Image: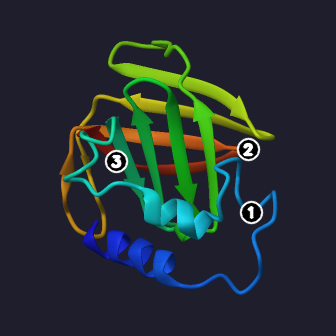
Amino acid sequence: MRALLMALALVACEAPETPPTSEADGGLGMHAHDALAAMPSWENARAAGVDFRAVGSEPGWMLDIHQQNRIVLIWDYGEGSAEFPLVEPTYPQEGATRYDARAGGHTLAVTIRRFPCSDPMSGEQFSASVEAVIDGRTLTGCGRSV
């Protein structure tokens, strides 16, 4: 997990070679690299209003579900980003929570399963396994309340 966070941090430090376009900002109003840099650290996430965070690798991605108003997803090591309104979750099965949202031309389905998950790169343990499907593309990883 530390390797993923380091890779994400390095991507955030790189200057974009081309100016941002409306597609590059993913609805966040900024370039994806800037959006990645704006994500709060694990230590500061709760104070920033984040309730739950999920991360994954190959490719690197991070998802924050905020306490009140939004879901933010950054994927492909910061190359893609999108912000969604926080929608009312559904509970498709015992121990699972699902969010289905649309914004800025993107669709997102997040399923959180309260099942222990281990990051394959670092061995770090999490309380949930997470599947995020962005525009039909599936990202898998782990997450926990912050």
**In this picture, is 124 found above or below 63?**
below
Amino acid identity at mark 1: Ala
Residue 7 placement (x, y as % from top left) = 41, 77
Residue 24 circle label: 1
- Whether residue 10 is situated above or below residue 130 in the rendered picture: below
Is 135 left or right of 33, judged from the image as shown?
A: right
Q: Position of residue 30 (x, y in %)?
A: 65, 59
Q: Give the residue at x 43% y 81%.
A: 10
Q: Residue at x 81, y 65 (%)?
A: 21
Can you tell which quarter of the image residue 15 is in?
A: bottom right
Q: Amino acid at mark 3?
A: Cys
Cβ atoms under marks 1 and 3 closer than 8 Å: no
Secondary structure, mark 2, is loop
Residue 123 drawn at (x, y percent): 20, 63
Which residue appears at 70% of the width and 47% of the height? 27
Residue under label 3: 142
As drawn, the label of residue 74 is: none
Task: Using the image as rendered, state which of residue 119 and residue 70 is in the foreground.
Answer: 70
For the N terminus, which image quadrant? bottom left
Sequence-first disc among 2 and 1: 1
